[in-house]
Amino acid sequence: MPAAAILRNVLLLEQQRGFDDRAVVGGLLGLVRKLDTHLTISAVSLDRLRRYADASPAERRQVVEILLGELGAFASSAPSTGFPTDSAPRNGRRSSSGSVTPSPGTPRAPKPNSRLNPSTPLSALPGVGPARARRLASLDLHTAGDLVGHFPNRYIFYPPPKPASHLGFEELASFEGTVDQLYETRLPGNRRRISAVLRDSTGSVGANWIRGGRGSLGIREGMRLAVSGPLIRYGRQVSFENPDYEPADRIPVNTRRPVPVYPLTAGISQLFLRALVWHTRDQLLPAEESLPAWLLKEEGLIGRQAALDGIHGPDSPDALAAAKQRLAFDELLPLELIALDRRRRYQAEPAPAINVPWRLLADVCRDLPFSLTGGQQRALSALLDDLASRRPMVRLLQGDVGSGKTVVAAMALLAAIASGFQAALLAPTEILAEQHFRTLTRLFEAAQDTALEALGHRIRLRLLSSALTRKARGELLDAIRRGDVDIVVGTHAVIQSDVEFPSLALAVVDEQHRFGVEQRVALRAKGQNPHLLVMTATPIPRTLALTIYGDLDISYINEMPPGRQPVETILIEPDQRRRAYDRIRSDVARGHQAFIICPLVDGSGVVEAKAATREYDRLKETDLKGLRLALLHGRMRPALKDDVMRQFADGAFDVLVSTPVVEVGVDVPNATVMLIEGADRFGLAQLHQFRGRIGRGSDPAKCFAVPGGESGESLARLEALASSNNGLELAEADLRIRGPGDYFGVRQSGFPALRIADITDAAFVQRVREAAKRVLARDPELEQPEHSGLAALVRELTDEVQDAN
């Protein structure tokens, strides 16, 4: 076919595809290089073709129309199927007659010019029968769109092919040659070694495959074969061992280029899945661009379709990096937009401005039996600045167990009531609500005379508890309704419909991960759009602070009160438990208490972890016989759990054997020893919180960690725990190891699975956050047409994930 006719047909196909530069393998630039000497078009047009790949869609349209006019073509003409576009060779080997012979493991190609939609079921694709469709469904792949969204988890960077004479000591190599010899050797265990000698004009190389069963590789003598894989040298002979292979005259899919390696399931081979993804991409309608052109330009990002091409079939490491960057942007940008928009909407209505009573706070701080740490002072300063503003505060206060978060919250509560408003403190459990009530009562006791002078009355602090009689509860609700209560402490029952605050200006919530957005909306309805402070002992890594907690300002208390000694953490082998038991007995003899943490409530034949119930029974009769033991686990009734914890805190028991339910527990300053069984089954952040339950007083404390397994990763985590008492450092390490979903627990966080984005890359997360701010500054409601794709991503993600905050 004349070069001009070939170019005309490709241009017409390019026009039909929407000017995506994929009408021919290598794009129009590659075609020009092949046809340059045979083309009779003008030099200006040749130059336009050479710059086509870097042109915008509008510029590409103009180039194609000019060239078609120059070649005498008409836009309505149908492209000839005689020219090999990239869809034909991808499906197999082209014979001398121009037909395509399917390659081994390759699905049959769809009919020419047929296009797939993202919603096309995989069962409708050629080569995917009911059995394969069921297997693909186990990978959560149901449609063509799912398949293109099934990203590789790694790549094999095969180099371009070399002649046989140039192959030597490379670890990975590629070669193209004719199959000169092919023979098979039987091996024990119903296995076979299939060996081939491949030859080119410079020499020969060997190739060996080990296979089980009776299936054929689809290789025959005389065919031209391409192989890529590990290269072994035997004297002067080189041989490929179990290489990837395919016909040499087809477009490289499995060899001679960076090759994707996909997550698989039983019954689906890598060769089949690669071919299926390749052909589906070729027949799928071009991906709709979700990001506006201005953002792509500002961030230097490639288009969505180019990113999908680059992630599945990168031409180079640089192309792969560009694709990953774009797709990571797509994953994180909707998260940032949701967080920032949630914050904007929460702060759209003004909050009560609280006049900070500096003298009252100074008097209260002076009367405290301790001085505030630098971390507490910085956090309090940020809180008071927020409260003085008409913009609703939405702040998270993070600090390790015992770092003094409650004291900071108490000062904020005092500021609110000094301005004539009401305040509330919410805790996740009754026993914690009681603890907070006692703590606030103690803190405010010394300040009551000062408060009487400043407020005209003593601080009216009340506990809303389920232990109240019906009459007492009714009287308390009436007092709250009249404004005769300044601060209400309770569980989430405080936001029930029958609790009415006439002037609620501040709500403090302990352990924020148990307090979602629905509860926050209910809280807003309780008062005059109150300020919100949420507290947590869970260390929040910076990148999660920018994403899953992106709607909150965050203050960190990174110092412990004076006199607190760091807990010494010791890793011991299972046969060294006697060390821990001896320490428990000696500390109990001195009047102290201990925790023993077990992973599971009931025994399991699958998971070799200590069951709290069995361990409790065993310890009572053996290693800790004679001590007063108590049992605590998540399957106990809430009232019983609270009763056990209350008795333990009061000193009625020496040792508490517990499951992880103790992670959020009451303050037991007398506890100085902890033994954690199956410590490798917990995350670093959780282990750090367990450890925070002891050493709350001035006495030295020890934590013994017993790993239940010997995997290198789990032991490395435990060694990190033993070497550091910095909760934030451990949280960052935990996030790198386990990812955001496992860090919080999928059911708790609803954090979407990130397939490309690295949530620990703080610089990149911050970059995406700044981009989200620019988007919302231009179009707060994402109503402009250029942002329609982005709005669709945000809606989809909003429906998919639960709220973490």
Image (cartoon, rainbow, N blue to C red):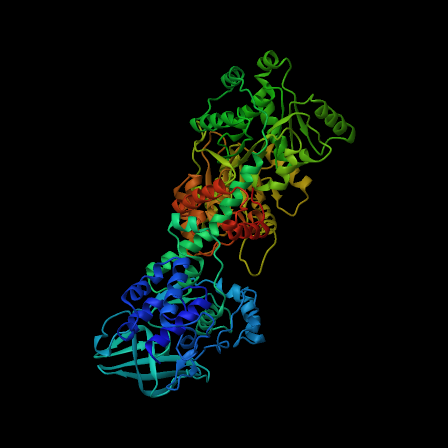
Q: In this view, does 194 lie to the left or right of 343?
A: left
Please tell me which residue lies in front, 700 or 357: 357
Q: Relative to 697, is 35 above or below?
A: below
Quadrant location of the N terminus in the rendered image: bottom left
Q: In this view, does 390 lie to the left or right of 725?
A: right
Q: Exactly how many numbered labels are in the figure?
A: 0
Q: Which residue lies furthest to the right in this view?
A: 471
Regarding residue 575, the answer to whether it shows in the image is no
Please tell me which residue lies in front, 670 or 738: 738
Please tell me which residue lies in front, 48 or 487: 48
Regarding residue 32, the answer to whether it shows in the image is yes
Residue 538 is situated, as x and y percent measured from the top left of the image, at 50, 40
Please tell me which residue lies in front, 527 or 55: 55
Please tell me in which quadrant of the rendered image residue 200 appears: bottom left
Please tell me in which quadrant of the rendered image residue 181 appears: bottom left
Quadrant location of the C terminus in the rendered image: top right
Q: Relative to 121, is 214 above or below?
A: below
Residue 560 is situated, as x and y percent measured from the top left of the image, at 45, 31
Residue 79 is situated, as x and y percent measured from the top left of the image, at 44, 75
Residue 84 is situated, as x and y percent measured from the top left of the image, at 39, 77
